Image (cartoon, grey):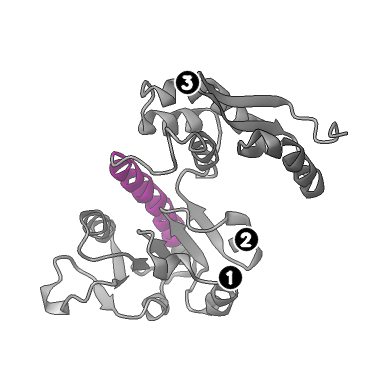
Amino acid sequence: MYDKIDPEIIVPLATPDGIKAIILGVKSIRPKEVTRLRRSLSRMNVPLLMMPVKEAQVVKNVYCFYRLGLLQETELYQHCQEHGADFIMVRRALGLDPAIGQTREQENGELILNWLLKTASLFFAFRIERDFNKKSVGNVSLGVWGNAETPFVYEAVTSLHFLGADIHLFSMHDEDKDDMKFPCILYQDKWRALQGVDALIILEKQQAFVSIPVKEWYIRRSLMKQNIVIDVCNLYEPEEMEQIGYQYISFGRFYV
């Protein structure tokens, strides 16, 4: 009855206590067939996740090692990069096991910062080359959303400024401009911080950033010179943002 889904690989996240989740690696996903399959497996009371075959194979290969702590988050990220797999998709699948969960480890801070600086450097190089051809080279300006008090935001902003970016920072923290510990222009409105900048960088998962409707993103498209969003928190689905005209680059996706 469900042979149309035709999974290439079936990965049960299983321990001696029982099955925690079922991962299916498929070539294509048909929503109606997925719904029927979920209903048929509902009596098992375990989550079901479908994903591309490549990512499902990585989940199968690393699950036991990751659950036992023999494979760290950084090593998992590198493994996904080496095999051309989407780290976020793999991590979400592994997180269906309650013993693992979806919360990232603290060690990810350095990994994410390195990814951000690498991504920003590539963007800067593209921007400078483009402007050089137009004979209008200027500093790259970035809108940044994040709490000015947190060490991660401080390190990210100072590093981006060191690379040559002008920073327009929106911070929920009400800090006096004269007390700012790093060079930037401080804004109290997140959309004003994007006026005329080259790209937006989202550094934190805050309610003010997570709850923005797609319709509002669409309306705000004209604020930036280029509709580029670099998101270290993976707050949105790339396909959804791309459909409304943004180039959405998020941590862990294989396209970077």
Task: Give, as a single range, the part of the protein colored magenta.
Answer: 107-129
Q: x, y percentage for residue 153?
A: 26, 58
Q: Specify which label sits upstream in the sequence, 3 or 2.
A: 3
The spot of residue 242 in percent (x, y) is 61, 61
Type of residue at label 2? Glu
Q: Residue at x 30, y 45 (%)?
A: 109
* Residue 199 forms part of the magenta stretch: no
* Residue 199 can be seen, yes or no: no
Q: Is residue 161 above or below residue 111?
A: below
Q: Between residues 41 and 176, which one lies in front from this camera angle? A: 41
Q: Which mark is residue 226?
A: none
Q: Main secondary structure of the magenta part?
A: helix
| Spatial separation of the CA atoms under disc 3 and disc 1 | 38 Å
Secondary structure beneath disc 2?
helix
Residue sitting at 55 percent across and 77 percent down? 216
Residue occupying image coordinates x 46% and y 56%: 126
Q: Which residue is mark 2?
A: 240
Disc 3 marks a residue whose amino acid type is: Cys
In the rendered image, which quarter is residue 89 located in?
Answer: top right
